[in-house]
Image: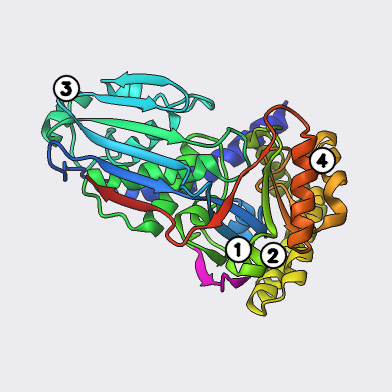
Amino acid sequence: MAYREYEDEAFRLMRDGLTASALAKRQQPHLSVYSDQIVWGRSPVRIDLAGGWTDTPPYCLNEGGNVVNIAIELNGQPPLQVYVKPCREYKIILRSIDLGAMEEVDTYEKLRDFMQVGSPFSIPKAALVLAGFQPGFSTESYASLEEQLKAFGSGMEITLLSAIPAGSGLGTSSILASTVLGAVADFCGLNWDKNEVCNRTLILEQLLTTGGGWQDQYGGVLRGVKLLQTHAGMDQSPLVRWLPDYLFTGGEYQKCHLLYYTGITRTAKGILAEIVRSMFLNSTEHLSILGGMKGHALDLYEAIQCGNFDEMGRLVGKSWKLNQALDPGTNPEAVEAVIRRIDDYCLGYKLPGAGGGGYLYMVAKDPEAAIRIRSILTQNPPNSCARFVDMTLSDKGLQISRS
């Protein structure tokens, strides 16, 4: 049908506009480690408390976005980790510890074959392209990938570890992409700061055609509690307003923040495509809800600034209602059944990200209510995978170090 052609063209034009900066700033990677060194990147994940979706193109390109989110570690560890080291052979070896997968890349053709959603190595392939290991993205020209790696000084091995289930809602794929980009940039001497890494993550997701906004990567790459704000335009580098963390780390409050893996998963790409389609069509209903989300993020920002725990929890609950107004499918019956059991003990709750499954974040009314919630869901879990996960605020964000 004709409208499909117009729709595809709209998505293409947006992708081209967002990726133009990467092509304009070509890279010259060079080996910047010793032959026996390993570059180690690790990142927390994020929970969006308010304003999610306002960071997503084309809405943020037209209106700017406001998001309040937090960076968290799970069970005391940053759950996303990447290792990069030199390889004696002039090729690229990709490994995934959690998926048990491995692939060898020895041609430009294999490297640019990254537009397969669900492929275990789409992200590192696209990251290497952005780092300059592809004609058109490099300042130099080479006859082959092998020749470029010889000039570079070695091949490389990239190993990924995502200690978190797929479809978690915690921004995993975007933050993993940032972690890969950060580690590769350090290995290749590209001198990308955290802002550049996050900008290139947005470009990487456009290359993968998965779309997405900027709040996931900034939420994990940058530490702690923050309000992220952008203005209209193609440059979507957020202004960061740091918030006090007392409502999350104070002794009387820390136990009230609960994270529960529901065992129910949902892939974000389909949800994202539908919401973005409504943005392109200037749906009055959707644009009105998104405008409300922007204002709501400022309300939550104010509650945290004022140290009002009850109001903060209530506003987290309002975020969940706004998400459902934008996409009713965000709260399937299986999730609602879990929520009904703990509703009386919570100030607010929401599924992070696009919703539909993954983790359930809850703000209990008090420590006693938190104990009751744990008891209810531990004694009668909805499925064999459901479980509580300890969450702690990350005070570091993305970390890159060397052996």
Whether residue 244 appears in magenta in the rendering, the answer is: yes
Residue 8, placed above or below residue 237: above
Q: Secondary structure at mark 2?
A: helix
Q: In whole angstroms, how far apart are the C-alphas of marks 3 and 1?
A: 46 Å
Q: Which residue is mark 3?
A: 89
| C-alpha distance separating marks 4 and 1 | 34 Å
Q: Position of residue 219 (x, y in %)?
A: 53, 56
How far apart in space, not on screen, are marks 2 and 1 (Cα)? 9 Å
Q: Secondary structure at mark 4?
A: helix
Amino acid type of disc 4? Val
Q: Are marks 2 and 1 in contact (CB under 8 Å)?
A: yes
- The tag on residue 64 is 1
Residue holding disc 2? 294
| Numbered disc 1: secondary structure | loop
What range of the chain is rendered magenta?
238-246
The numbered mark, 2 or 1, whose residue comes first in the sequence reads 1
Dot 1: within a 10 Å radius of its alpha carbon, few (fewer than 14), some, or many (20 or more) residues? Answer: many
Closer to the observer: label 3 or label 2?
3
Left or right of 244 on screen, residue 179: left
Farthest bottom residue in view: 306
Where residue 30 sits: x, y (%)? 17, 43
Among the two numbered marks 3 and 1 on one chain, the one whose residue lies closer to the N terminus: 1
Q: Which mark is residue 379?
A: none
Question: In this figure, which residue is indicated by the disc labeled 4?
Answer: 338
Local packing at callout 4 (Cα closer than 10 Å; few below 14, some 14-19, many 20+) is some
Whichever of labels 4 and 2 marks the residue nearer the N terminus, that label is 2
- Upstream in sequence: badge 3 or badge 4: 3
> Which quadrant of the rendered structure holds the C terminus?
top left
Q: Secondary structure at mark 3?
A: loop
